[in-house]
Image (cartoon, rainbow, N blue to C red):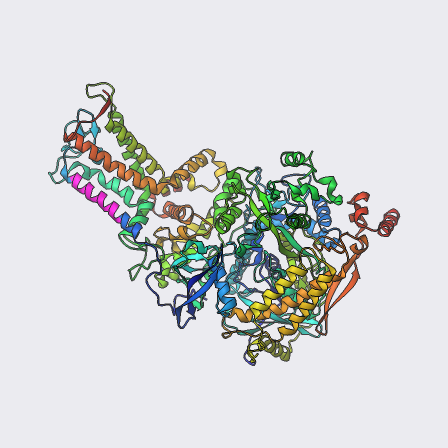
């Protein structure tokens, strides 16, 4: 492998979604030579699928909002399992990150005073989501993409080349991270277009690869979401936390079959959409859990009044956090009150005029019209839960986004902790911006502080290339495994046995099946063709990552014997305060996934005091509260 | 409900290729991309096709179906007769890499040639104030998912590859219009002239407003009426309207 | 890195479209040709354009500005001399009226597609070896559209005046005939077409970036934008109505049939 294409950078960012681009912008602004590596074309990242908005307590619509309220909502949404420091940073920095986007050229919808308009969303006490119709993710990705281009234009003016300081490697897959001792040293990957390998040397790597949703059959995620970053981190020696928490978005399309899982934005409910069973009953009133009773209406009259008078009425239960709504829908369908295609009805035509729907939800209207022949201005949508987001990810230092591996950083969905056991809608885009920037800064600081740049061992590169090419060498046609079939098999297992409602026995069976599939994965072969843009080969490499991540999810889920947020167990249906402070970490030891428990650092006293004693009692153990009380008394 | 659909797919690379016939199972409600995926999973594992969101939001799966530029994820099989042969070919304007995947780097090259948004001096983040009615025009253009179907269908470059140097295509002329109409863009105040650049560097004069870009846009952006023609009119303000120029000079 | 300019390896048919893509351009070509032929015949026919009893002036001859005009037809005087029989009165006005339509953004699309096949239809290869669009002479002159728009406003005003005059009775005083109604329809369509023009939309408000500082112009722009969305329909409707009213006046003036009178 003498003539392998080689590049040297200061910071490598893997992933070109919101977090990756924000990290790259930050690193470049701090003088780092930066590379962005992405599996798709530049600007196609999964961030475009985010519809609702960016949560940031700017207080433009309701001036009562501030970071404390946002922090409280986030912690409640995550059932207090969140890394509180991340939640604090997120709530305090999100407004600034959104305003920054305007200086890059973003055009959000406006309030009458000309400020950024904000909309209601599940779990958020005030209208908080900066948005552009229902295509906010597209605005975010395009804005960041254009900011990258503007930095490149500046580099061209100064250095004569667009790519002098910031280069995008599009349609490029990273197969392995390289290390020098225990430190990051770079990455190996290949151009999807021609299958040629590339060695990138860099002292720091930012993972921003998104999630793992493609491991499940019914998902709103695209093909890219195969847990690459999670797997790369594991193999590089980092620890994943909270992998058992997978968010099922309550409203995905259920019909026709080919679009099953495609997202129906939460804005439909935020803007007044209601959920009904097959008999037309608004069933969500039956599913308001004890901890949320104080702030959610118990009848349709009050819920309806809330839209016009939010200060004197409680919120409609359709706007409960996503885990609650998803479980409710799941239960309605299970008990036979679902729609013909196995969902429930979501109706927005009853409350909004045709013009309002076209203005606020244009892409939803378009999506249903084109794909399902349903006109949402007059007809109900059929919806059901779909795998949407993984709360778990690389364990990072909240302030710098650094993982345990020196030089390895993670931001966005691939990082864990921020959202606890369940993410609120709208908190994902703000997460990308806040921690994307922090990761870029963290990586830049790390590189500046280095005394010696790491070196890449050519043998490691050869090994990585060899492993990636091995599927071409599986000669025995009879024993060869087909990646398409294996992916589908794994998706079925995960969906059926580690899905929205879980059970100990089923998860044991899932682990066995994953292990069995894993055994066969060694015989995964490229079914046909050469290295030139060969989706069969690409999938072989993806399936390996999906298996590793799937195992983490199942193993951690089996270990956590309670129900909390995005982890619901039939055999342990209650939330257990003893589990609140305990996190499950996954590491790879000698090629095997190992799950272990670890204690969360107790929340800082001033943050604790943002909540009422009664509320804390629902989540914390008596001992934890006693310790906290003595601490605040001595202060 | 399912039936055997007849698909004719272009297979090949930059050197050579051909249209090949396949029969694929089609289920109710399926789109062309579903069938391409089934083909991939069952018969042609190396069939190259770009896709991401499968919901018409990312603009990856552009191709030509029965000769018309379309997103394959939004092209339902129910558009066609069950016994009709459905022909899927790569976008013609761009060089083929393999099968349905083209080299769309032309677009990224052109994107870089449009000077970025110029933030107004003296306004800090958080101080931007814009009225909804002032941002609405540019917002329409920002709906663009960069599927590049408008670039593909535009005859200026589709039929005349030699024009690719001089012409940026509807997508990036629209980008110029978007920035030109941005209420806070400071480019002109710093001496820039976006309409003049659209004429000079981006070849707006080549556009003969035959509206194929508008027809093909999956986001239903009225590219011609709302971006290209207004831009042509702004060029006319500056270059082809002596009376207006006279008045403007007087004002200055 | 420069933009790749070749499309290698793809030798394919002119188009793979399976629908009847040639139908719309064919329709356009026939429609426009019919109008042009009618207009030529009518202009050089040079008679039957003034129905004195009903006070109908045929739109093709309005305003009638030459000394060659039949008595009563010249509402705005006769600044032009009678040059020759083969220089009929419309020669002085028609270039402006046609110029407006010829440089109109809709008609440009229509005749580029139908007559010049650039392109004949979307995703159908055009037969030209080189293409420079409107970037060079003579097509760069299309940029004069706004000046033709100004003259079109004058012409529309004149036709409005003609229509007001048509509200006269055959026996003096007030009167309405079928021709009057047709002229009203025609003049409404003409105004709608003229005001829906893209240049008008630009001049009235499109050229400003801060609508919020110009609320009146914003309102007008919104209104014109609404009309502009129907520019194509209005272009055809007004084209047909002009020809029909002209034909009607011709038949009445020639005495082919009496104008049905509603009032007087």
Left or right: where A562 falls relative to B106: right
Observer-nearest residue: A223 or A483? A483
Query: Measured from the top left, where is residue A413 in percent x and y?
Result: 65, 58
Q: Residue at x 71, y 49 (%)?
A: A77
Instruction: Specify whether residue C59 is in view.
Output: yes
Observer-nearest residue: A580 or C41? A580
Check if residue B203 falls in the magenta segment: no
Check if residue C39 falls in the magenta segment: yes
Q: Which residues are magenta?
A: C29-43
Query: Measured from the top left, where is residue A50 in percent x and y?
Result: 58, 52
Instruction: Specify the principal SS of the magenta part.
Output: helix
Up the image or down, A353 lies above or below A388; here it is above
Quadrant in the picture for residue B107: bottom left
Up the image or down, C87 lies above or below C256; here it is below
Instruction: Specify whether residue A191 is in view.
Output: no
Observer-nearest residue: B133 or C36? C36
Circle count = 0
Query: Measured from the top left, where is residue B92 in percent x and y?
Result: 39, 63
Left or right: where C74 falls relative to A417: left
Query: Measured from the top left, where is residue B25 in percent x and y?
Result: 47, 62
Up the image or down, A273 lies above or below A558; here it is above
Q: Quadrant of the C terminus of chain B?
A: top left
Left or right: where C255 falls relative to C225: left
């Amino acid at each position: 492998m003498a003539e392998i294409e080689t590049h040297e950078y200061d910071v490598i960012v893997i992933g070109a979604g919101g977090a990756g681009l924000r990290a790259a912008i930050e690193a470049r602004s701090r003088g780092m030579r930066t590379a962005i590596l992405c599996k798709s074309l530049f600007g196609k990242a999964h961030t475009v699928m985010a519809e609702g908005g960016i949560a940031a307590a700017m207080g433009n619509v309701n001036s009562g909002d501030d970071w404390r309220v946002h922090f409280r909502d986030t912690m409640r949404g995550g059932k207090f399992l969140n890394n509180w420091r991340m939640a604090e940073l997120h709530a305090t920095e999100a407004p600034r990150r959104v305003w920054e986007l305007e200086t890059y050229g973003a055009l959000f919808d406006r309030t009458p005073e000309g400020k950024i308009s904000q909309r209601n969303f599940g779990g958020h006490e005030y209208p908080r989501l900066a948005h552009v119709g229902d295509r906010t993710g597209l605005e975010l990705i395009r804005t960041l993409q254009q900011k990258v281009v503007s930095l490149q234009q500046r580099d061209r003016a100064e250095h004569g080349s667009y790519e002098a300081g910031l280069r995008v490697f599009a349609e490029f897959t990273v197969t392995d991270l390289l290390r020098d001792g225990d430190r990051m040293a770079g990455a190996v990957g290949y151009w999807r277009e021609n299958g040629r390998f590339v060695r990138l040397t860099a002292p720091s790597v930012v993972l921003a690869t998104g999630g793992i949703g493609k491991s499940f059959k019914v998902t709103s995620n695209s093909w890219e979401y195969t847990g690459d970053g999670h797997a790369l981190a594991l193999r590089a020696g980092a620890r994943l936390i909270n992998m058992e928490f997978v968010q099922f978005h309550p409203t995905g399309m259920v019909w026709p079959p080919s679009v099953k899982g495609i997202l129906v934005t939460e804005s439909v409910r935020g803007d007044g959409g209601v959920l009904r069973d097959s008999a037309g009953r608004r069933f969500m009133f039956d599913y308001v859990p004890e901890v949320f009773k104080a702030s959610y209406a118990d009848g349709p009259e009050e819920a309806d009044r809330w839209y016009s008078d939010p200060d004197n009425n409680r919120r409609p239960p359709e706007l409960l956090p996503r885990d609650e709504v998803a479980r409710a829908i799941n239960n309605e369908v299970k008990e036979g009150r679902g729609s013909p295609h196995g969902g429930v009805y979501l109706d927005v035509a009853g409350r909004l005029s045709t013009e309002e729907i076209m203005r606020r939800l244009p892409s939803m209207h378009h999506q249903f019209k084109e794909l399902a022949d349903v006109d949402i201005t007059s007809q109900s949508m059929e919806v059901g839960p779909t795998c949407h987001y993984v709360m778990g990810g690389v364990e990072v230092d909240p302030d710098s986004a650094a993982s345990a591996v020196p030089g390895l950083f993670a931001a966005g969905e691939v990082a864990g902790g921020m959202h606890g056991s369940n993410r609120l809608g709208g908190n994902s885009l703000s997460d990308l911006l806040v921690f994307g920037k922090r990761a870029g800064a963290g990586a830049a600081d790390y590189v500046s502080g280095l005394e010696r740049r790491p070196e890449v061992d050519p043998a490691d590169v050869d090994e990585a290339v060899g492993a990636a090419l091995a599927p071409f060498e599986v000669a025995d046609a009879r024993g060869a495994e087909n990646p398409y079939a294996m992916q589908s098999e794994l998706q079925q297992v995960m969906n059926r046995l580690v899905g929205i409602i879980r059970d100990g026995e089923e998860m044991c069976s899932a682990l066995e099946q994953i292990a069995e599939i894993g055994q066969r994965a060694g015989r995964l072969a490229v079914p046909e063709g050469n290295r030139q843009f060969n989706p069969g080969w690409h999938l072989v490499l993806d399936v390996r990552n999906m298996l590793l991540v799937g195992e983490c999810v199942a193993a951690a889920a089996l270990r956590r014997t309670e129900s909390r947020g995005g982890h619901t167990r039939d055999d342990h249906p209650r939330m257990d305060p003893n589990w609140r402070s305990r996190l499950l970490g996954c590491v790879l030891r000698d090629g095997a996934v190992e799950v272990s428990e670890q204690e969360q650092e107790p929340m800082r006293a001033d943050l604790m005091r943002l909540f009422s004693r009664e509320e804390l009692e629902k989540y914390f153990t008596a001992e934890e509260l006693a310790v906290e009380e003595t601490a605040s008394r001595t202060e | 409900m399912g039936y055997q659909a007849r698909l004719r797919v272009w297979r090949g690379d930059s050197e050579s290729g051909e249209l090949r016939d396949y029969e694929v199972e089609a289920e109710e409600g399926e789109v062309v991309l579903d069938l391409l995926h089934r083909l991939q999973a069952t018969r042609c594992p190396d069939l190259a096709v770009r896709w991401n969101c499968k919901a018409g939001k990312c603009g990856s799966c552009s191709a030509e179906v029965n000769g018309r530029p379309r997103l394959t994820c939004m092209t339902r099989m129910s558009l066609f007769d069950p016994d009709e042969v459905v022909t899927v070919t790569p976008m013609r304007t761009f060089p083929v890499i393999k099968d349905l995947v083209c080299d769309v780097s032309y677009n990224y090259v052109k994107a870089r040639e449009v000077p970025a948004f110029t933030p107004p001096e003296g306004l800090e983040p958080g101080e931007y104030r814009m009225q909804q009615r002032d941002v609405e025009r540019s917002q329409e253009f920002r709906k663009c998912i960069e599927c590049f179907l408008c670039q593909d269908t535009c005859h200026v470059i589709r039929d005349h590859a030699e024009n690719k140097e001089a012409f940026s295509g509807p997508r990036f002329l629209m980008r110029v219009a978007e920035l030109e109409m941005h209420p806070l863009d400071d480019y002109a105040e710093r001496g820039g002239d976006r309409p003049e650049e659209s004429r000079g560097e981006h070849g707006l004069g080549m556009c003969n407003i035959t509206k194929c870009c508008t027809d093909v846009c999956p986001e239903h952006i009225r590219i011609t009426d709302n971006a290209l023609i207004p831009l042509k009119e702004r060029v006319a303000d500056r270059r082809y309207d002596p009376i207006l120029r006279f008045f403007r000079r007087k004002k200055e | 890195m420069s933009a790749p300019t070749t499309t290698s390896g793809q030798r394919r048919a002119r188009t793979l479209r399976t629908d009847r893509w040639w139908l719309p351009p064919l329709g356009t070509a026939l429609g426009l040709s019919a109008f042009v032929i009618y207009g030529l015949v009518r202009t050089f026919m040079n008679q039957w354009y003034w129905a004195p009893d009903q006070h109908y002036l045929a739109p093709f001859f309005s305003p009638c500005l030459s000394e060659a005009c039949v008595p009563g037809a010249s509402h705005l005087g006769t600044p032009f001399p009678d040059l020759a029989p083969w220089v009929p009165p419309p020669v002085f006005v028609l270039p402006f009226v046609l110029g407006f339509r010829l440089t109109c953004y809709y008609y440009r699309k229509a005749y580029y597609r139908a007559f010049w096949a650039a392109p004949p239809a979307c995703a159908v290869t055009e037969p030209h070896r080189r293409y420079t669009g409107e970037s060079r002479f003579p097509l760069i002159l299309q940029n004069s559209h706004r000046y033709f728009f100004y003259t079109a406003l004058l012409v529309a005003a004149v036709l409005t005046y003609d229509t007001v005059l048509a509200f006269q009775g055959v026996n003096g005083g007030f009167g309405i005939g079928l021709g009057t109604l047709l002229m009203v329809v025609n003049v409404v369509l003409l105004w709608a077409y003229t005001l829906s023009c893209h240049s008008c939309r630009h001049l009235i408000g499109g050229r400003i970036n801060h609508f919020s500082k110009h609320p009146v112009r914003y309102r007008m722009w919104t209104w014109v934008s609404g009309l502009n969305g129907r520019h194509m329909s209005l272009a055809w409707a007004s084209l047909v109505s002009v020809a029909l009213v002209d034909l009607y006046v011709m038949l009445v003036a020639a005495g082919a049939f009496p104008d049905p009178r509603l009032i007087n």
